[in-house]
Image (spheres, helix red, strand yellow):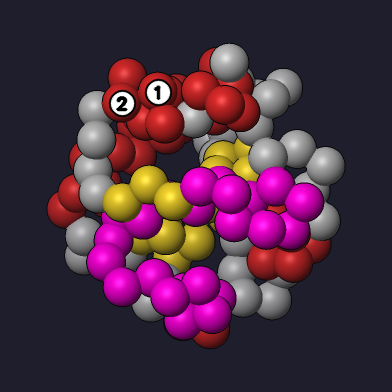
Amino acid sequence: MAMATVTATDADFEDVVLKSDKPVLVDFWAAWCGPCRQIAPSLEAISEEQADKITVVKLNIDENPATAAKYGIMSIPTMNVYQGGEVVKTIVGAKPKAAIERDLADFIG
């Protein structure tokens, strides 16, 4: 099964995220982060269920430190919603899928 989530890097972040015509939820994560792994299935489900409204992108902060530093990502998981190239919402910490969906209600409602 193909992953609905997209992977971004420092190199393509602008094209994948900032220039998107849809809102983009970026999950800043790392392989060693347990809570990041906990929310991954929820984000995958949201990505599939809301594909027409929002794009879900994962960015590994260990492999792409420049983007994480640029946006001041201090703890993970942190999820930023970008719209029109700007951060319009920040969600910090592992939450159940329903709570993430509530946080995204303005974008997927």
User: Could you say which disc has been placed on residue 9 in the image?
Assistant: none
Going 27% across and 66% down the picture, which residue do you hit?
75
Residue 82 painted magenta: yes
Q: Secondary structure at mark 1?
A: helix
Residue 85 painted magenta: yes
Residue 100 lies in what quarter of the image? top left
Look at the picture and state if 98 lies above or below 62.
Answer: above
**Label 2 with label 1: CB-CB less than 8 Å:** yes
- Determine crowd level at label 2: few under 14, some 14-19, many 20+ residues with C-alpha closer than 10 A: few
Residue span colored magenta: 67-89
The amino acid type found where label 1 is placed reads: Arg
Look at the picture and state if 23 lies above or below 42.
Answer: below
Look at the picture and state if 45 lies above or below 15.
Answer: above
Residue 29 lies in what quarter of the image? bottom left
| Side (left or right) of 44 relative to 56 | left
| Side (left or right) of 18 relative to 108 | right
Q: Nearer the viewer, residue 91 or 6?
A: 91
CA gap between label 2 and label 1 equals: 5 Å
Residue 32 in picture, x, y percent from top left: 21, 65
In the rendered image, which residue does mark 1 sit on?
A: 102
- Residue found at the far left of this picture: 34
Residue 102 in picture, x, y percent from top left: 40, 23
Residue 30 lies in what quarter of the image? bottom left
Residue 96 in picture, x, y percent from top left: 24, 28
Residue 99 visible from this viewpoint:
yes
* Number of numbered discs visible in the structure rendering: 2
| Side (left or right) of 91 relative to 76 | right
Q: Nearer the viewer, residue 100 or 44?
A: 100
The amino acid type found where label 2 is placed reads: Ala
In the rendered image, which residue does mark 2 sit on?
A: 99
Going 31% across and 26% down the picture, which residue do you hit?
99
